[in-house]
Image: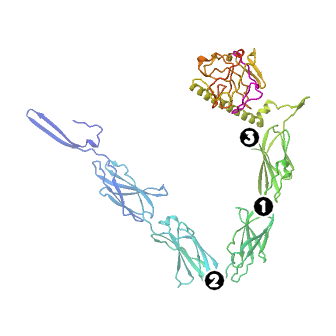
Amino acid sequence: MLIIKQAVREDSGVYVCSAINNYGKDETRLQLLIQEAPGPPLNITVTNISARTSSLTWTEPFNGNSAILRYLITYYRIDDGQENSNLNVSVDGTVTTTVIRRLQPATLYRASIRAQNGFGWSNVSNFVEFTTAEEAPSGPPEAVKGAATGPNSVKVSWKPPEHKDWNGKIRGYYVGYRPVGADNLYRYKKIDITDLNTEEEIHLTNLQRSTVYLVSVQAFNTEGVGPRSDEVEVKTLEDVPPTAPDVKVMSSTTSSVTLGWSQKATFGKAVTDYVLHSRINKDPWEETSVKTNNKQYTVTNLKCGTNYQFFFTAHNSVGKSEPSNVVHARTDGAAPLSPNYEEFVSIQQTQAILHLSKWQNGGCPILSFTVRLREKFHTRWRTVADKIPANKPNFVISHILPSTWYKVLVIARSSAGATEATYDFKTHNLTRDVIIHEEATVTRSPSSTSLITDLEILIPVIVSSFVVLVVLVVGCVLCFREQNTRNRTGGMPHRPTGKLLQDTVQLKELGSPPALDTVSSEEGTQRSSSQSQSTNHYPGGQSVYSHRPEEGHPYATPYDTLPVPPVGDSQQQPSSSSIHTINRRGLDKRVNNIYYSRQEGFSNRLAPSTSEEGLNQIKTFKPTRWLLPNEHHIFTKEAK
């Protein structure tokens, strides 16, 4: 016995049982069928689509080893993406095609199929969608109306048929009309509906005067014409209404506008009156009956400085004319005019007075004021007062901080519009004490808190600090670059060369050196190192100069005279020199706050020596004025 648990479709087939012994072999065969519900129908196709019917075909699915008993077709209509109730059609299991009937024209449908055998229903097949063909409209237009517009014309209007009766897209209408009488045939006018023309109305012309006409309307689409609407009667006029007048603006004041118009000739019925239609901007139209023979009318009680729109219609015993042209007019007057700062704002310590009476009305009375306030460097406005009466001459802004900048915004309103004006002001300090001394008058400065809050003082301080910082940074960069240059040259300053006697200063022994390390000068006190008196600290051929003063430079000091060793052979030169030269003709170079002169044409020859008494001591040369850059002088012995 073979037992298959949880049998599935793949267990179906032919099973063989074989028995073998020493005398031979024998076997038995048996077939096993696993039966189940069928699979879903395949390859559904929609064919032969018409306005009311559609054919469906499909392929028979796996029957589950049991004959298919029937197929169930489910379909429903989709309107604007919404699914409607399902409709079902059942067919015999031996066929694989059917026709779905009673469909709606120009409608989108969705359909699916299921199969059934003795063991149950299959799953739902894939969906298919199809749209039925159009059909001529099945309903007439609605709300057909006719109105006489003259002795030879009528106006016909209507609404489309109910949407369910369109059977497609409405492409246009046929408007039929005929005089009342049994033998008269319809005349038709065609109206095509496009994206640019969707109005359901028409003017029928060339009609007979004072005649009754029957009018009906039919809708049509690409498949044909729909049924005719009910007939309506309309009678042409014995005469015509007046033509529309031609209106223009004659003049205006602050409260009135004078309009004039011209009227074309009529067929005989005189104009009995006019109706004036007026409004402000987009407000509803207001009607005023005007009875006059002057063809001129003054509209009064208008708002000052306001825009108006006007048009007329003319009336007689037959009817009224079409609207005239619309004219635009503005009454005289402008929005308020703001005063200047000096006459409008008065400042005190903790309040500001606004002289509202200084505003000019611009021709239209000022209705009210609004005052808003904020500190000058803030962004949010605070409404101090709203709807201040126009007859109030002054307005006081109180409880504000002293010594503070403010912005005040004033809005003045009239019927001609609103005017906004902004004013900046600073309140006064609370105290200003003045102390008078014998030699000068000194004003006590504000407190530290006032200095911080007063931007007039704070901003210059910040800017000055920034400038000083930039100067210091630039100076450091220049010093760094000069130090790099000196390092590249081995720490040796430039040695003066060129003509010796033309542009040099001979400094001879002037006496014993001072006992102190500092030397006073007219420009201040400078330091002169005692170690610089010996040339043993400097390599041969190096000229060293002390700080060079420059006009206007905050750190300028007089020249220090330092020993300069001879330029020639070091073995032939003494250990100290009695004559030191400072070259000022060429362009100086500054390294580590020591200036080195560069002079073209300077000789390498040494100046003559002075007396032996001055070999070891050097006096500081004190000039009567500072030498300028690129300036040279020749000093004689007598000018020492």
Tag 3, which secondary structure? Answer: loop
On the rendered structure, is 66 left or right of 55? left
Residue 576 or residue 116, whichever sits in front: 576
Residue 377's mark?
3
| Cα separation between marks 1 and 3 | 36 Å
Tag 1, which secondary structure? Answer: loop
Query: Among all residues in the image, which is located at the extreme bottom?
Result: 183
Residue 233 drawn at (x, y percent): 59, 78
Q: Nearer the viewer, mark 2 or mark 3?
A: 3
Residue 311 drawn at (x, y percent): 71, 70
Residue 408's mark?
none
Earlier in the chain: of badge 1 and badge 3, it is 1
| Cα separation between marks 2 and 3 | 80 Å
Q: Residue at x 79, y 38 (%)?
A: 404
The crowding category of the residue bearing disc 2, from other C-alpha atoms within 10 Å (few below 14, some 14 to 19, many at least 20), is some
Q: Nearer the viewer, mark 1 or mark 3?
A: 3
Q: Nearer the viewer, mark 2 or mark 1?
A: 1
Identify whether 468 is placed above or below 416.
above
Main secondary-structure element of the magenta-colored stretch: loop
Displayed quadrant of residue 597: top right
Q: Please report contact status of discs 1 and 3: CB closer than 8 Å, yes or no.
A: no
Residue at which label 1 appears: 305
Q: Residue at x 61, y 79 (%)?
A: 153
Earlier in the chain: of badge 2 and badge 3, it is 2
Residue 72 or residue 571, whichever sits in front: 571
Quarter of the figure that contains the N terminus: top left
Tag 2, which secondary structure? Answer: loop
**Residue interval drawn in magenta:** 615-640
Identify whether 503 is placed above or below 318.
above
